[in-house]
Amino acid sequence: MPRVRPKVIAIIPAAGSGTRLGGQVRKQFLPLKDKPIIVHTLRQFEHCPDIDEIAIAVPESAIVEMESLISRYRLHKVSKVVLGGEKRQDSVANALRKLVLKDSDLVLVHDGVRPFVETKRISGLIKACKEHEAAVLAVQPKDTVRRSAGGGFFDQTLDRNALWLIQTPQAFSAGLLVKAFGRAKKDRFYSTDEAALVERLGVKVKIVEGSYDNIKITTQEDLELGKLILERWKSKGLI
């Protein structure tokens, strides 16, 4: 029987070295309480009913370890473990090449070290993407934001209500995302997120409200904060 809805695939780039956290263990494999960070991340997508398939990109040296974690924690939706690239964009591109996609399918891209994205946020993002072709999670800054062109003194106070802190996942129609990556490769253009690649095609990206819990773990302070968030989520029955 043919599919009655687009397939929804999550790509998780997790090939970073994690040098800011120090040590010999890559940050995505560091323990967060009882499980590696990457397992906490993958479980949110595993438990989201709107996600059909997951592809994860890791360094070559971590492929065997990742496959072992997938088996150990029964992450059945992970269909592919692909070789990560030098940069995040390269890792996502490698995953896109390995996936069988229709233009109407949806692709979400999510940082491997953002373990606290709620399944309801994932589902809400998917709904917005179906309506607008491109959507991202974002939150507004809580603090006053000022600009300093030279670094020594402030020269402008920015309107906080007009600013957004971009998170992941970011969701796109597969056809649009593949086209955006093709254009970026042709132009040798790199960006820190996929939304910027899509915007180069003239497509506007829908803002979907995220959560301040959805932190990216890059420093030791982030790791300590993550432990507190995890305990709070457990007390609320969120995991």
Image: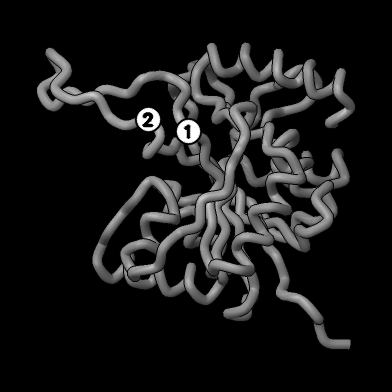
Q: Amino acid at mark 1?
A: Gln
Side of 4 relative to 135 (left or right): right
The answer to which quarter of the image holds residue 126 is: bottom right
Q: Secondary structure at mark 1?
A: loop
The answer to which quarter of the image holds residue 90 is: bottom left
Side of 204 relative to 97 (left or right): left
Image coordinates for residue 39, horizontal then vertical, percent: 74, 36
Q: Residue at x 18, y 25 (%)?
A: 156
Looking at the picture, tell me which residue is in the foreground, 69 or 121: 121
- The residue tagged 1 is 140
Q: Is residue 32 above or below residue 8?
A: above
Q: CA distance from mark 2 to mark 1?
A: 7 Å
Residue 26 visible to an observer of this rendering: no
Label pair 2/1, CB-CB below 8 angstroms: yes
The quadrant of the rendering that contains the N terminus is bottom right
Residue 29 visible to an observer of this rendering: yes
Looking at the picture, tell me which residue is in the foreground, 44 or 186: 44
- The residue tagged 2 is 160
Image coordinates for residue 174, horizontal then vertical, percent: 56, 71
